[in-house]
Image (spheres, helix red, strand yellow):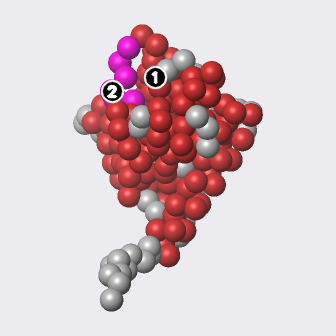
């Protein structure tokens, strides 16, 4: 009697929904920022870095996920580091812009913090694979070639701090430690990418506004009458 292989465990539908949606968002992201073979490589590398980390994602693995050979990857990017820099730079431009652009549309610190956090948390949920690729792996990259990426990170840090300082100055925020509040607000928004799964009961937008409410609490916002 021929031996049979043990049955493979079925993949839960929620996991499939999350992965399909997350990969589609990566495709859309790079469709807007690259063309031709570079777009395929950037897409494949983003997925590889998200799943395996910077050190775990070999050039061969990136090439396989891109549907290309390793030699073809090197035609467009000289090294894995150059490839990760491109992903980190474009990703940080999008993620920091997700906070700063909406925040600048509000006239007061409460509105600025609420809109900025709602948009930033939403972005990290919707773009969970890209966020995981850049937010956790960038800490390994401290060389001068990543100075532009770190400048974007510092700029959003400073923007949040400016909003908190303005709110304290006008009496709408009550904070003893502004630096702690800034770190907590940004880190909680970023951490959404770690646990969020597409297809769950909460949508990215709903999560964004829940985190905006949390930011108000962390900032010690006084309840204002409208």
Direction from residue 187 to residue 26 in the image, left or right: right
- In the image shown, does 35 or 68 lie closer to the viewer? 68
Whether residue 31 is visible here, answered yes or no, is yes
**Where in the figure is residue 223, as x and y percent of width and height?**
43, 55
**Where in the figure is residue 38, as x and y percent of width and height?**
66, 31
Name above or below for residue 16 compared with residue 146. below
Disc on res. 140: 2
Secondary structure type for disc 1:
helix
Place residue 8 in its image quadrant: bottom left
- In the image shown, does 137 or 99 lie closer to the viewer? 137
Q: CA distance from mark 1 to mark 2?
A: 11 Å
Place residue 167 in its image quadrant: top left
Disc on res. 5: none
**Where in the figure is residue 137, as x and y percent of width and height?**
37, 34
Quarter of the image containing the C terminus? bottom right
Q: Compare marks 1 and 2 and give the one earlier in the sequence.
A: 1
**Where in the figure is residue 51, as x and y percent of width and height?**
41, 48
Residue holding disc 1: 81
Pointers 1 and 2 in contact (CB under 8 A)? no
Q: Residue at x 68, y 47 (%)?
A: 28
Nearer to us: label 1 or label 2: 1
Q: Provide the residue span drawn in magenta.
A: 137-143
Place residue 138 in its image quadrant: top left
């Amino acid at each position: 009697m021929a031996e049979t292989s043990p049955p493979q465990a079925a993949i839960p539908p929620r996991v499939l929904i999350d992965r399909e949606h997350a990969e589609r968002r990566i495709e859309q992201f790079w469709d807007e920022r690259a063309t031709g073979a570079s777009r395929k490589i950037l897409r494949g590398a983003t997925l590889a870095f998200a799943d395996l980390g910077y050190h775990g994602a070999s050039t061969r693995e990136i090439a396989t996920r891109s549907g290309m050979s390793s030699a073809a990857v090197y035609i467009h990017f000289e090294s894995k580091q150059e490839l990760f820099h491109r992903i980190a730079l474009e990703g940080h431009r999008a993620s920091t812009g997700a906070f700063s652009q909406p925040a600048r549309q509000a006239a007061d610190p409460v509105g600025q913090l609420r809109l900025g956090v709602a948009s930033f948390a939403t972005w990290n949920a919707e773009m969970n694979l890209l966020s995981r690729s850049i937010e956790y792996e960038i800490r390994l990259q401290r060389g001068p070639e990543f100075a532009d990426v770190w400048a974007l990170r510092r700029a959003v840090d400073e923007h949040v701090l400016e909003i908190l300082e303005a709110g304290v100055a006008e009496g709408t925020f009550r904070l003893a430690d502004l630096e702690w509040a800034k770190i907590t607000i940004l880190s909680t928004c970023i951490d959404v990418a770690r646990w969020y799964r597409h297809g769950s009961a909460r949508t990215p937008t709903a999560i964004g506004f829940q985190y905006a409410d949390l930011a108000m609490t962390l900032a010690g916002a006084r309840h204002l009458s409208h």
